[in-house]
Amino acid sequence: MQYPLELTFKLWALAPQISVADHQGNLVFYVKQKLFKLKEAITIFADADRTRPLYYIKADRIIDFSARYDFSDSNGTYIGGVKRRGLKSLWKARYDIFDGDVSNLTIQEKNPWVKIADALLAEIPILGMFTGYVFNPVYLVSRADGTVVMRLEKIPTFLSRKFMIKAVDQLSDREEEQVLLSLLMMLLLERNRG
C-alpha cells in the first residue's frame, strides 16, 4: 500500500459509498454498503464497477450496538474482525481489532469533544454548514503497548466527506489488512459523527 490513502464518501448516494485511493490517485478499494440489511454484509471491491470483490465484511448478529464484524478475502479465508467497545464508545469511539479471538490493536478517537462541538454547531442555521471545515475527528490505531501504528483524520471540506489514512509505524501485511478493513467498517458505523 502506498500511503497516505484518501477515502472519499460519495455525496449524493442513498447507500453509503466510499472510494479509497493511494497517494497517486489510483483506486485501491471501492465500498458500497447495502441499505435495509438487518444483518450487515459489505463487499469491498477492487474497482468502481464492482466486478472484482476483494473482501467481505459480515456482522455476527442482527442490528446490535456491539456486533462483531468479521473479514474474509474473496476465497472466504478468515482475516480478522472488529468490534465496538459497547457503552464505552458512546463518549469516545473505541474499537478492538481481532485476529481470531485475540485483540492486539485498538482504534480510538483522539478527542471526543470534536464530535460534541460538531453536533451542537451543526444545528445552528447557516453556521452549521461550515462545521466540516472546523471540526475534524482523528482516530488513532495503536498496539496494546500504546504504540500508534496508523492515523485516520477527516480532511476539512465543505460538502463532501474526505478522510486521510497515514501509516505511522510498521505493520505486517495481515495486520495492515485488518487495520484498513477495520477503519472502513468504523467509518461506516461512525459516519453520522463529524
Image: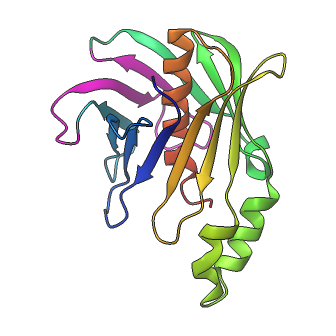
* Residue at the image point whose x is 71% and y is 27% from the top: 106
Q: Is residue 12 left or right of residue 79?
A: left
Q: Quadrant of residue 48?
A: top left
Q: Between residue 80 and residue 153, name the one nearer to us.
A: 153
Q: Is residue 73 magenta?
A: yes
Magenta residues (range): 48-74
Q: Is residue 126 left or right of residue 2?
A: right
* Residue at the image point whose x is 37% and y is 64% from the top: 11
Q: Is residue 51 left or right of residue 177?
A: left
Task: Name the quadrant of the N terminus.
Answer: top left
Q: Quadrant of residue 78?
A: top left
* Residue at the image point whose x is 61% and y is 13% from the top: 171
* Residue at the image point whose x is 59% and y is 62% from the top: 156
Percent x, y of residue 146:
83, 22
Percent x, y of residue 66:
62, 37
- Figure check: 40 above or below 103: below
Residue 160 in view here: yes
- Figure check: 146 above or below 50: above
Task: Name the quadrant of the C terminus.
Answer: bottom right
Q: Is residue 135 magenta?
A: no
Percent x, y of residue 192:
56, 60
